[in-house]
Image (tube, coloured by chain):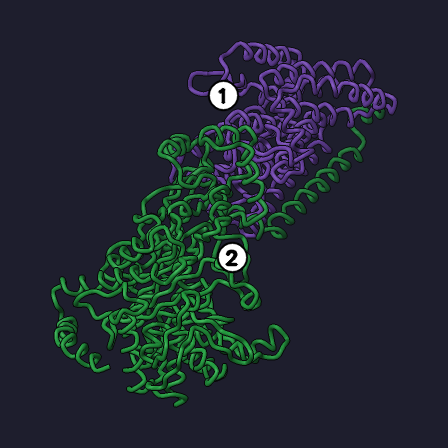
Chain colours: A purple, B green
C-alpha cells in the first residue's frame, strides 16, 4: 500500500521555517568565529542544512507507513549501531561519534528518529481507549534500551530526549490512572538507583543546580557565564561579532550546546524573541500536521517529532538562564553539529510525508 | 464499522490542542525569563561581562627619591615585585587551588585563606597582594603556572631603600602599608595595600613622593591569556624631593651624638634651612619598607629611648639656662635694666619668702658681683632670678612667645610639638589655681613649667642672633616647595626686631660663654668665631621642684651654638637627655659647627661664598678687639 503523495502538497512552509532557523544558526557560528581560525565552520553547517533539505525531500517521498512497517529492523539497526559505538575509541572522553572517514556520525541523533518510528509503530495499532501494560512494556524497551546504551557513551542528555517521545505517544493514545500511579511509584523508586549510576560530573550538575553556592568552577560556572552572556546582551544585543563572553571563551561549547547563549548575547532579547517565535511557528505547524494526519500512525510520528523538538528547545533554552540543570542537549537546527541538523531535517521529512498523505486514505 | 474505524484512525482533537497550549505556556515562561535577565538585570550582567574580559593590573608609581642639598641620594628605590591575586576570577578558586597556590608560593595556607576571605568583603576589583616582596622563585612559579592559576599576576613594585640605614631616620621617616584608619578616613586617596610615608619627610611630602599609580587594562580570555589591550591609565612617577639637609654635616651630628639619648638640630638662621637633624637612639627604616614583624615593632615602641620619636621636634623639655637669653632680651628691651646692672651673687637668694639656689651653691660659693655679661658667660642663676622678679611672668612670656617658643615653628615635618611658655592664664586653665609669682623666678632660668623642643631653641637663638628675624625652619627650601606645588609654603620670616645695643650685648655674652672661659668653653676653637649658651636643666616636674632636690635625676644637657657670632650662618642646638651637665652637649655642637666651617673653607667659593669669606677674613680682626674692651 505505497501511497505516492502529492508533490503540490509538499510543506514548503514547514521546511522553510526550519531552513531560516538553521541559517540563523550558521550566521551566528560565522559571527562568533569571526577573526579566528575557526571562521570556516559555518560552511559545514550550511552544507548539512542543504543535505538535510535533500534528505527531507527524499524521506517525504517515502510513505511513512512503509517506514513504520520496518520499525523492528530500524530499531535493531539503531541498537546495533549504539552497541558498536561503545567499542570505538573515545573522543574527548566519550564514545558518541562514529567515524565515517569524511565525517563523524553522532549515532544517537539518528536513533532519535528510530525511536519516533518505533513508538509510533507500537501505538498505532492500539484500538482500545488506553495503552495496555504490554504497550508500556514495549515502550519501556524501545526507549530504555537505546537510552541506556546512549547513557553509557556517556550522553545522558541525549538519552533523556527519548523519554518525551514515548510520553507524548502515550498521552495521545491515553493511559489509565492506575498505570500512571504505578509508573510514578516505580520511577520514584528508581531515582536513587539512577543516581547511583550517574557519573560524578553528572551528579555535580544536579547538585549545583539545587545548591548553586556549592559549585565554583564546574557546571555552575558554565550556567553563570551563560547567564552573564545573555544578560549582558540586553535588549538589542552586542551586535554581530561582538559577543565578548562567547568570543573570549567564557561560554563553554559556545557553538554547540550553548549556541543560544552565544546568539542571545549578540542579538539581544529581540533576537531571542525572533528565534523563539520561529520555533513556536515550527512546532504549531507540526502539531497542525499531527492534527490533520490521515491516520493515527501519522499523528504519532509527527507528535513524536514535535515532542522531541519541543523538549530539546525548552530544555536547551531553559538551561541557558538557569531554569534547568546543564545537560548536553543541543538546540535543534541552531547548534553546530551535522548529525543533529541532518536528523532534524529527516524527521521533518517524515512529517512532510505525513502531511502529503493526509487526504489519500 | 466504517464509522468506528474512522474514529479509531484519529485521535481526539483536544489532545493536540493540549500540546499547542503546552508549547505556548512553556515558551511564554521562557521568554519572561529572558526578558528578566536581558532587560531587567541587563546592567548587572553587562558589568560582570566587562569584568570577565578586562583585567586591570595596577602599575605602582615609583616613589620619588629624597636627596640632600647637594643632590646626594638619601632615600632610594630598588625594583622588586609582589604576587597578587586578581579577584575578577576569584570565584573560580577552589580550596584545592588555594592549597596549591600556598604550596607554590611558600605561604601559610591558613593566612592565605583568611586574606582571601577578608578581601572578599571589600571592593572586588581590587587585586589582593598575597605575597609582597616576593622572591625570584615565586616569580617563576607565577609565570610558569599562568594557565593553571590565571588569577595570579606579578606586580612590579619599588622597595624603599634607605642606603644609610638609621642615618637621619627620625627626620626622613619611613614608609609602610597604609593603615585601615588612613584608608577609611573620608576623602582618603589611599587604597588598601598602598605604601605611604608614615613619618618624617616621607609622610610630610608623601603626595609629592608617591606620584599616582597607573592601570594597565588588557582584554583576557577565559584562560586568563591576554588577547588585546585597552586604554590604560598612565603612571605618574613620584617626584624627587631635595632637602636642605647636608649629608656631611648630618654625618658629623650623627657621630657626635653617638649612643646618647637626645637630638641635634643645625639650622641656617639666615634662611631657615635645616642642615642637620638627628634624634637618637634611632632605628633602621629599611625594616619598615618591608613588612615589619610584630616583634620588632613591639621592641621599637617599648624602648624607653623612644627611637621612633623625632626628639628634635618632639622632645619638650625645660631649656634650663638657655632661657636666660630670652630673659635678658626681655629685660634689656623693656628697659627694666641696662647692661651694666649688677647683682651680688652669694650662691642663693630669697625672693617672695623662698630661697632659690644658684647652680654654684653646692660648691659653696657664688659668682660674687656680676653684670649682665658675666651673668651670661657664667650662667649666674641669682642674677636672672632677680631679673625674673623685676620682669614678672607676663613680660618674659611675651618675649618668649615672640621669639619662637611656646608654639610650633612650622617646620615641614609632621607631629611637631609646641612646647610651653607658662602664663597665669595657662595655670588657671590647666591647674585651676592662681599663679604664684615665685614661679616666674624659676621660669627666668628656664626651669619651672617652661618647655621647649631642640628645634625651637635653635630657631629662637638663631633668630635673636640675626637681630630678631626668625625664618621658619624647613627641610625643603621654599623655592623647591613652590616648584613641587606642595601645601608647605614657608611664609615670610617673622620679625621681632631687637635693638642693636641689646643684640650686641647678648652676642658678646654668648661669645664669652665660649671664648671667655664660660660654661661653653669646650666649644672654643682657634680661628672659628663660635658663640653659644649652655643649659643644664633639672629633670623635675613643676610639682616636684620644691620637694625634690636629690641628684638621682640626671639633668638634661643643652647647648646652642652659632657661628659666626654676628650674622650667624649656622646655629646648632644639642640636647642630651640625662646628659648630666651641659659640658656633654657642647663638643657635639662644636664639631658640627667645625664641620660646616671646614666645608665652607674647602669649597670653591661661589659668588655668595666669596662674600662670606671676605667677611670672615675681616671678621676675626675686628670682633675680638670690640670684645676686648669689655
Left of B587 or right of it: where is B190?
A: right
Q: What label does residue B445 carry, if any?
A: none
Q: How many marks?
A: 2
Residue A75 visible in this rendered orientation of the protein: yes
Marked residue chain, label 1 = A
Quadrant location of residue A75? Answer: top right
In the rendered structure, the answer to whether residue B9 lies left or right of residue B57 reads right
Q: Quadrant of the C terminus of chain B?
A: bottom left
Chain name for mark 2:
B
Q: Residue furthest front?
A: B364
Residue at which label 1 appears = A92
Return the x and y of residue B132 as percentages of the image width and height.
Answer: 43, 41
Residue A88 at x, y percent in the picture: 51, 11
Q: Residue at x 33, y 65 (%)?
A: B475
Q: Nearer the viewer, residue B558 or B475?
A: B558
Callout in the foreground (2, 1): 2
Instruction: Please tell me whether residue A103 is drawn above or below residue B235 in the rendered image.
Output: above
User: What x and y, as percent, mark residue B228?
Assistant: 37, 44
For the N terminus of chain B, the quadrant is: top right
Q: Residue at x 45, y 58 (%)?
A: B554
Element at label 2: helix
- Mark 2, residue position: B182
Q: Please rate how many residues cluster around mark 2, counting C-alpha atoms within 10 Å: few if below 14, some from 14 to 19, many from 20.
A: some
Residue farthest along the right direction in this orientation = A178
Q: Is residue B485 above or below residue B284?
A: below
The quarter holding residue B104 reads: top left
Residue A304 point in image, percent of width and height: 69, 26
Residue B211 visible in image:
no
Amino acid at each position: 500500500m505505497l501511497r505516492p503523495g502529492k508533490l503540490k502538497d509538499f510543506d514548503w512552509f514547514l521546511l522553510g521555517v526550519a531552513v531560516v532557523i538553521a541559517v540563523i544558526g550558521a550566521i551566528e557560528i560565522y559571527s562568533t568565529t569571526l577573526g579566528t581560525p575557526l571562521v570556516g565552520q559555518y560552511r559545514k553547517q550550511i552544507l548539512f542544512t542543504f543535505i538535510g533539505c535533500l534528505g527531507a525531500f527524499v524521506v517525504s517521498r517515502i510513505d511513512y507507513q512503509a517506514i513504520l512497517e520496518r520499525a523492528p529492523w530500524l530499531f535493531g539497526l539503531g541498537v546495533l549501531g549504539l552497541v558498536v559505538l561503545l567499542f570505538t575509541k573515545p573522543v574527548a572522553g566519550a564514545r558518541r561519534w562514529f567515524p565515517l572517514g569524511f565525517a563523524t556520525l553522532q549515532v544517537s541523533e539518528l536513533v532519535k528518529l528510530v525511536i519516533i518510528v518505533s513508538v509510533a509503530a507500537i501505538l498505532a495499532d492500539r484500538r482500545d481507549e488506553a495503552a495496555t501494560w504490554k504497550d508500556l512494556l514495549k515502550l519501556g524497551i524501545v526507549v530504555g534500551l537505546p537510552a541506556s546504551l546512549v547513557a553509557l557513551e556517556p550522553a545522558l542528555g541525549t538519552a533523556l530526549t527519548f523519554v518525551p517521545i514515548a510520553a507524548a505517544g502515550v498521552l495521545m493514545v491515553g493511559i489509565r490512572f492506575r498505570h500512571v500511579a504505578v509508573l510514578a511509584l516505580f520511577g520514584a523508586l528508581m531515582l536513587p538507583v539512577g543516581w547511583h549510576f550517574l557519573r560524578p560530573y553528572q551528579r555535580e550538575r544536579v547538585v549545583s543546580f539545587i545548591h548553586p553556592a556549592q559549585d565554583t568552577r564546574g557546571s555552575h560556572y558554565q550556567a553563570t557565564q551563560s547567564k552573564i552572556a545573555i544578560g549582558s546582551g540586553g535588549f538589542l544585543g552586542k551586535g554581530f561579532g561582538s559577543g565578548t563572553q562567547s568570543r573570549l571563551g567564557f561560554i563553554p561549547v559556545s557553538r554547540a550546546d550553548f549556541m543560544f547563549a552565544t546568539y542571545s548575547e549578540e542579538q539581544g532579547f529581540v533576537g531571542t524573541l525572533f528565534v523563539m517565535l520561529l520555533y513556536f511557528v515550527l512546532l504549531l505547524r507540526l502539531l497542525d500536521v499531527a492534527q490533520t494526519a490521515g491516520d493515527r500512525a501519522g499523528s504519532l510520528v509527527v507528535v513524536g517529532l514535535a515532542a522531541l523538538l519541543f523538549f530539546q528547545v525548552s530544555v536547551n533554552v531553559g538551561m541557558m538562564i538557569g531554569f534547568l540543570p546543564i545537560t548536553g542537549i543541543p538546540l535543534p537546527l541552531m547548534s553546530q553539529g551535522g548529525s543533529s541538523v541532518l536528523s532534524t531535517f529527516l524527521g521533518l521529512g517524515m512529517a512532510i510525508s505525513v502531511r502529503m498523505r493526509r487526504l489519500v486514505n | 464499522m466504517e464509522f468506528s474505524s474512522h474514529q479509531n484512525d484519529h485521535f481526539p482533537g483536544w489532545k493536540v490542542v493540549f500540546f499547542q497550549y503546552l508549547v505556548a505556556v512553556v515558551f511564554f515562561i521562557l521568554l519572561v525569563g529572558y526578558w528578566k535577565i536581558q532587560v531587567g538585570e541587563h546592567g548587572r550582567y553587562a558589568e560582570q561581562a566587562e569584568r570577565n574580559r578586562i583585567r586591570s593590573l595596577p602599575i605602582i608609581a615609583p616613589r620619588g627619591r629624597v636627596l640632600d642639598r647637594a643632590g646626594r641620594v638619601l632615600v632610594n628605590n630598588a625594583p622588586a615585585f609582589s604576587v597578587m591575586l586578581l579577584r575578577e576570577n576569584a570565584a573560580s578558586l577552589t580550596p584545592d587551588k588555594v592549597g596549591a597556590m600556598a604550596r607554590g608560593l611558600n605561604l601559610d595556607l591558613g593566612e592565605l585563606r583568611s586574606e582571601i576571605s577578608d578581601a572578599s568583603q571589600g571592593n572586588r576589583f581590587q587585586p589582593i597582594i598575597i605575597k609582597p616582596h616576593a622572591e625570584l622563585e615565586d616569580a617563576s612559579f607565577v609565570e610558569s603556572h599562568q594557565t593553571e592559576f590565571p588569577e595570579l599576576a606579578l606586580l612590579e613594585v619599588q622597595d624603599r631603600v634607605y642606603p644609610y640605614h638609621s642615618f637621619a631616620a627620625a627626620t626622613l621617616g619611613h614608609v609602610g602599608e597604609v593603615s585601615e584608619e588612613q584608608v577609611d578616613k573620608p576623602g582618603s586617596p589611599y587604597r588598601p595595600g598602598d605604601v605611604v610615608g608614615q613619618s618624617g619627610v616621607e609622610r610630610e611630602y608623601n603626595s609629592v613622593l608617591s606620584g599616582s599609580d597607573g592601570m594597565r587594562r588588557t582584554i583576557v580570555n577565559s584562560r586568563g591569556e591576554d588577547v588585546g589591550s585597552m586604554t590604560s591609565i598612565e603612571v605618574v612617577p613620584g617626584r624627587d624631593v631635595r632637602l636642605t639637609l647636608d649629608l656631611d654635616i648630618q654625618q658629623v651630628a650623627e657621630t657626635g651624638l653617638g649612643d646618647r639619648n637626645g637630638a641635634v638640630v643645625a639650622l641656617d638662621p639666615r634662611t631657615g634651612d635645616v642642615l642637620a637633624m638627628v634624634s637618637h637612639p634611632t632605628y633602621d627604616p629599611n625594616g619598615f619598607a618591608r613588612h615589619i614583624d610584630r616583634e620588632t615593632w613591639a621592641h621599637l615602641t617599648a624602648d624607653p629611648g623612644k627611637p621612633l620619636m623625632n626628639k628634635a621636634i618632639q622632645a619638650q623639655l625645660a631649656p634650663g639656662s638657655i632661657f636666660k637669653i630670652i630673659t635678658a632680651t626681655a629685660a634689656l628691651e623693656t628697659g627694666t635694666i641696662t647692661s651694666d646692672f649688677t647683682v651680688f651673687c652669694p650662691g642663693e637668694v630669697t625672693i617672695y619668702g623662698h630661697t632659690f639656689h644658684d647652680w654654684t651653691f653646692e660648691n659653696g660659693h657664688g659668682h660674687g658681683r656680676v653684670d649682665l655679661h658675666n651673668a651670661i658667660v657664667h650662667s649666674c642663676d641669682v642674677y636672672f632670678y632677680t631679673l625674673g622678679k623685676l620682669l614678672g611672668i607676663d613680660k618674659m612670656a611675651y618675649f618668649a612667645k615672640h621669639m619662637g617658643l611656646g608654639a610650633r615653628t612650622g617646620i615641614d615635618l609632621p607631629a611637631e610639638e609646641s612646647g610651653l611658655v607658662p602664663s597665669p592664664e595657662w595655670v588657671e586653665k590647666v591647674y585651676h589655681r592662681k599663679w604664684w609669682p615665685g614661679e616666674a623666678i624659676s621660669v627666668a632660668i628656664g626651669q619651672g613649667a617652661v618647655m621647649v623642643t631642640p628645634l625651637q631653641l635653635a630657631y629662637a637663638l638663631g633668630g635673636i642672633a640675626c637681630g630678631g628675624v626668625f625664618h621658619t625652619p624647613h627641610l625643603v627650601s621654599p623655592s623647591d616647595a613652590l616648584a613641587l606645588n606642595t601645601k608647605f609654603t614657608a611664609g615670610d620670616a617673622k620679625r621681632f626686631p631687637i635693638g642693636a645695643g641689646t643684640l650686641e650685648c647678648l652676642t658678646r655674652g654668648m661669645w664669652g660663654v665660649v671664648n671667655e672661659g664660660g660654661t661653653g668653653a669646650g666649644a672654643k676653637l682657634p680661628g672659628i668665631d663660635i658663640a653659644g649658651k649652655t643649659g643644664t636643666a633639672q629633670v623635675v616636674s613643676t610639682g616636684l621642684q620644691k620637694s625634690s632636690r636629690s641628684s638621682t635625676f640626671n639633668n638634661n644637657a643643652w647647648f646652642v651654638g652659632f657661628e659666626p657670632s654676628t650674622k650667624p650662618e649656622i646655629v646648632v642646638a644639642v640636647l642630651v637627655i640625662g646628659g648630666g651637665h651641659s659640658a656633654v652637649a657642647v663638643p657635639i655642637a662644636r664639631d658640627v659647627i667645625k664641620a660646616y666651617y671646614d666645608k665652607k673653607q674647602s669649597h670653591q667659593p661661589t659668588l655668595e661664598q666669596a662674600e662670606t669669606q671676605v667677611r670672615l677674613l675681616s671678621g676675626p680682626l675686628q670682633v675680638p678687639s670690640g670684645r676686648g674692651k669689655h
